[in-house]
Amino acid sequence: MSFITYNAFATAVKAIVFPEGEAENLQTTHNSYIEDALIDLQTYVPCLRDNNVDFKTKEDFQEWCNTDFTFVQRGQIHAVYAFKPGKQCRKLYYNPKSAPWIDSWMQKQSCVACPPQTDPDNPALDPMCQTVSDADTYCDSVEDLEDDRIFKCRSRYYSLVAGDKLILAPRFPCGYTIAIHWEGIKRKYSGLEPVPGDTELVTAVVKWVQAQRALYLDRDGPIYDRIMHPKLGDYTIARANMIERCTRERRVQERHQALDGFDVLQPFFYDPLPTIDTNDAYDY
């Protein structure tokens, strides 16, 4: 599956729906139609829920007691890692932990009992780290990026707690980006976030946007009914085709997984019967 940015995806959709250009005062409305289409398709097509990736920087987080935390979209997180753009694409993964475990980890941090410092070398050792603050505040106060050697060598943990709050321990250094791979229905998109660039997806979203425009802007009920008919509508058929293709692709994946599992067990099935020494077989 190939990906393009959300901006490029929206531009491709609008070029088909509005070949003569869209009214500037309706751009927000049209963007909401595109997002609503993607939400509906994710609801019915499981394959569209598998490949969500969010990228966050310091300005997206707050800090407290040597941890970073932010709020993420509802879903199941599969991987969290930090990386520094332009530095050999090295990924520093976080290990999942429970909320009580993270609470215990924070209680053990020296920041809760360290002596006052006027200009600490490490913000994690500053007594003020007990106060919730914007994560990029410290980064704005340093001329160069902070030393990340300790961060790269130590263990890293994350926890997703109530309210879709993601906690990272320890805090990640200035200049790093956090990648969050998750499964679920993505409800908000920014310009540079990845979206599948499949022609089928573009076509389905185009049909949805055309239907919404007909219903809410042109007041043309027959066109809306033709596109959104629950059985024979253009959008319904396009969505059904995507569901069918996803089902086939997942069936192939399950077969590959089954074959891979057999490869692991193959030594046990290579010669299931014990070898009998014919000389001993009749030795009574």
Image (tube, grey):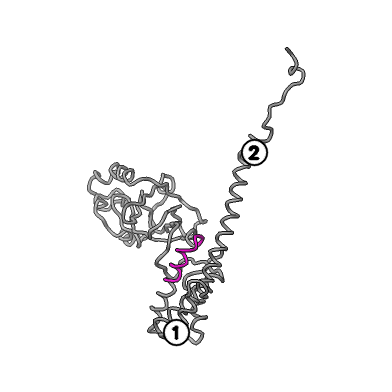
Q: Secondary structure at mark 1?
A: loop
Residue 269 drawn at (x, y percent) = 65, 35
Q: Which residues are magenta?
A: 36-47
Image point 64% across, 38% down: which residue? Answer: 266
Q: CA distance from mark 2 to mark 1?
A: 60 Å
Farthest residue, direction right: 279
Q: Main secondary structure of the magenta part?
A: helix
Where on the picture, by quarter, is residue 270? top right
Farthest residue, direction left: 116
Farthest residue, direction front: 231
Q: Nearer the viewer, residue 131 or 277?
A: 277
Crowding near the residue tagged with mark 1, few <14, some 14–19, many ≥20 C-alpha atoms within 10 Å: few
Q: Is residue 203 magenta?
A: no
- Indicate left or right for 211 with 262 as reference: left
Q: Which residue is mark 2?
A: 266
Image point 40% across, 47% down: which residue? Answer: 96
Residue 51 drawn at (x, y percent) = 49, 60
Residue 67 drawn at (x, y percent) = 33, 51
Q: Which residue is mark 1?
A: 22
Q: Is residue 41 magenta?
A: yes
Q: Secondary structure at mark 2?
A: helix
Quarter that holds the C terminus? top right
- Which amino acid type corresponds to the residue marked 2 in the rendered image? Gln
Image point 53% across, 64% down: which residue? Answer: 243
- Indicate left or right for 108 with 216 as reference: left
